[in-house]
Image (spheres, rainbow, N blue to C red):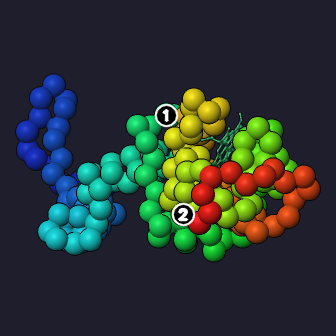
Amino acid sequence: MSDDKELDHEYDGIRESDNDLPNWWLNIFYVSIVFSIGYMIYYHWGGNGPGQMDNYNKVMAQVAENSTQTPQSYSFTEDELAEAQKSETQVSEGKKIYDIRCIACHGAGGAGGIGPNLVDSYWLHGGKPTQIANIISEGVLDKGMVAWKALLSKKEIIAVTTYVRSIYGTNPANPKAPQGNKE
Ligand code: HEC
């Protein structure tokens, strides 16, 4: 370049220049300084930016939520079940699962068969939403009810619970006689 400022030393034909840094380079440098201040405020100095642990916990929560591996146990709250119950999609997702996994023992529409009917107000293990979700999750192994936590994610168990609750009071064909206690 013609405006090269040359330092006055030379070694074997090699010379050293002393030029200003190009503006495009400096601008990137200044912008990165400004950016880093915002970054520090957001992520380090009490801003709301999620830290590594927050991200880690978020991912782990997602994994737990979607995992179909056998967990120790799922736990269900009345609130999350009540919230899910409001959703048509959850109920129809639940019906899909029911028609694949449960229908063989509990009959079409919950009429019952090998397993008890799921449409009346008599329950062997309790008819509260959390009780239903828990029995689906934990099963009754010595009576032939599968512990579905081994095969279904928590989400899927919540969905199928909403379906079971949605068929309460309906009249499927050939219902099995009531079993358990009236609730
Ligand atoms: C292999 C047969 C079988 C399959 C498949 C099955 N169940 Fe059951 N289920 C049973 C039996 C048997 C019982 C009764 C357990 C007892 O006598 O304590 C039962 C009980 C239940 C109960 C408790 C009923 C009550 O009166 O308290 C619910 C809820 C239930 N099952 C839901 C489901 C759902 C949802 C599925 C599908 C994800 C499913 N079951 C799949 C056999 C089955």
Label 2 near ligand 1 (CB < 8 Å): no
- Pinpoint residue 21: horizontal percent, then vertical percent: 23, 58
Amino acid type, residue under disc 1 in the picture: Thr
Q: Secondary structure at mark 1?
A: loop
- Pinpoint residue 54: horizontal percent, then vertical percent: 29, 56
Q: Is residue 137 visible?
A: yes
Against 77, residue 137 (above or below) is: above
Tell me which corner region of the image, top left, top right, bottom left or bottom right, holds residue 51.
bottom left
Q: In which quadrant is the C terminus drawn?
A: bottom right
Q: Residue at x 50, y 59 (%)?
A: 130
Is residue 86 rendered to the left or right of residue 168? Answer: left
Q: Residues within 10 Å of mark 1 (few under 14, many from 20)?
A: some
Foreground disc of the pair 2, 1 = 2
Quadrant containing ligand 1: top right
Q: Secondary structure at mark 2?
A: loop
Q: Residue at x 54, y 63 (%)?
A: 128
**Residue at the disc numbered 2:** 128
In depth, the one of 48 and 159 nearer the eye is 159
Q: Residue at x 43, y 42 (%)?
A: 73
Q: Earlier in the sequence, mark 2 or mark 1?
A: 1
- Pinpoint residue 179: horizontal percent, then vertical percent: 68, 51
In depth, the one of 20 and 138 nearer the eye is 138
Tell me which corner region of the image, top left, top right, bottom left or bottom right, holds residue 16.
top left
> Label 2 to label 1, Cα distance in Å?
24 Å
**Residue at the disc numbered 1:** 70
Is residue 45 rendered to the left or right of residue 117? Answer: left
